[in-house]
Amino acid sequence: MLEHGPLPGWQTKRFQRLSARLSAGTFPSALLLTGSEGVGKRRLGDALVRAVYCEQRGDSDPACGQCGGCRQLAAGSHPDLVICEPEEGKQSITVDVIREFSRKLYLTPQTAAGRVGYMPRADLMNVNAANALLKTLEEPPSTAHLILIADRPAHLPATIRSRCEQVRAVVESPDEAEAWLEEQFPDLSPALRQRLVMQPLLAESAQRHAQQESEIRRQLDMVWSQQRDPVLAAGELDDELLPRVGRVIHSCIADQFRLQMKQGASTRGRLAMQRLVDANAAALHLSQTSQANLRLLAETQLIEWARTGRLLTQN
Ligand SMILES: [Zn+2]
């Protein structure tokens, strides 16, 4: 299913160049789109797939959205589009998935445009899967195009990369991306906007993370000054916030440390801060193991945080 939004402005020219090659019959038999997360590779890939099957578009126009081909794509029922993704619940693409993908690519296409094999997360292939795909790339079906996308092309074997035409789909004009961010995410802080200029499509999750962090910080402030019970605060943290608690505490500790040093902390205060740093480092380490109970861990961290707050505010 193609589910990614409209093509952002900074990908338009690249789309038009590739799309014109579709019309000219010179589109690569295997295309690899690379570039870091958040540059819009998936949107570009989706737009190219739509361009292949749209029956009414001009050389470099985007798909019309109205014709039979466009409607079949929107419904997820186009007979010639073969999408390759990891099986549900799996982190990698296995050899069985690739075998089935390749088998479908060699079937006779049902439309004149031919088959498209679309791999939006090609860098998730494991070694055996990549070897299986290599066979298909060495003898590609004459009526098919492959479109691969990878955030981390280095995870693909060089043999795969060398058989694809590689296009780096990066942000070339930061000004354009900045204007887009300003329009789409007017609430973004200027600092965050600057940070996202080369990966603008991460803005939504970055904004959500910033809001989550400020909520955690608010809770931490109250716990530190004994206005809130640490166990209650941990119990009421949203599930979604739990994985971020350790990192936020980490940065709050750094802030507190600076403050304490500026105020000329006592030896007792310094020891308490050191103890907090150690406890949080241990908790951070633990939170990265798969069996960690994040809520329990947050509770332990908040209790330690409250204890240190009590000690230092009493000084
Ligand atoms: Zn169309």
Image (cartoon, rainbow, N blue to C red):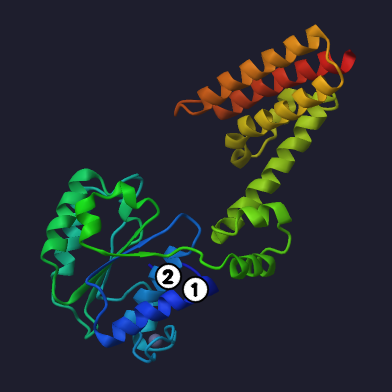
Task: Give the class, few, some or many, for how many residues have Cα within 10 Å of label 2's Cα (few <14, many ≥20).
Answer: many
- Percent coordinates x, y for residue 240 in the rendering: 60, 42
Mark 1 within 8 Å of ligand 1, using the beta carbon: no
Is residue 197 toward the left or the right of residue 111 in the image?
right
Residue at image position (66%, 22%) is: 301
Between 48 and 175, the one nearer to me in the picture = 175
Whether residue 264 is situated above or below residue 64 in the rendered picture: above
Residue occupied by mark 1: 7
Is residue 150 toward the left or the right of residue 239 in the image?
left
Residue occupied by mark 2: 44
Task: Give the class, few, some or many, for how many residues have Cα within 10 Å of label 1's Cα (few <14, many ≥20).
Answer: some
Q: Indicate the amino acid at tag 1.
A: Leu
The quarter of the rendering in which ligand 1 is drawn is: bottom left
Mark number displayed over residue 307: none
> Where, quadrant-wise, is the C terminus in this rendering?
top right
Whether residue 9 is situated above or below residue 300 in the rendered picture: below
Q: Indicate the amino acid at tag 2.
A: Leu
- Percent coordinates x, y for residue 21 in the rendering: 30, 82
Q: CA distance from mark 2 to mark 1?
A: 6 Å
Asked which secondary structure carries label 2, the reply is helix
Residue at image position (44%, 29%) is: 290
- Percent coordinates x, y for residue 29 in the rendering: 22, 71
Q: Is residue 240 visible?
A: yes
Residue at image position (76%, 34%) is: 219
Q: Is residue 95 visible?
A: no
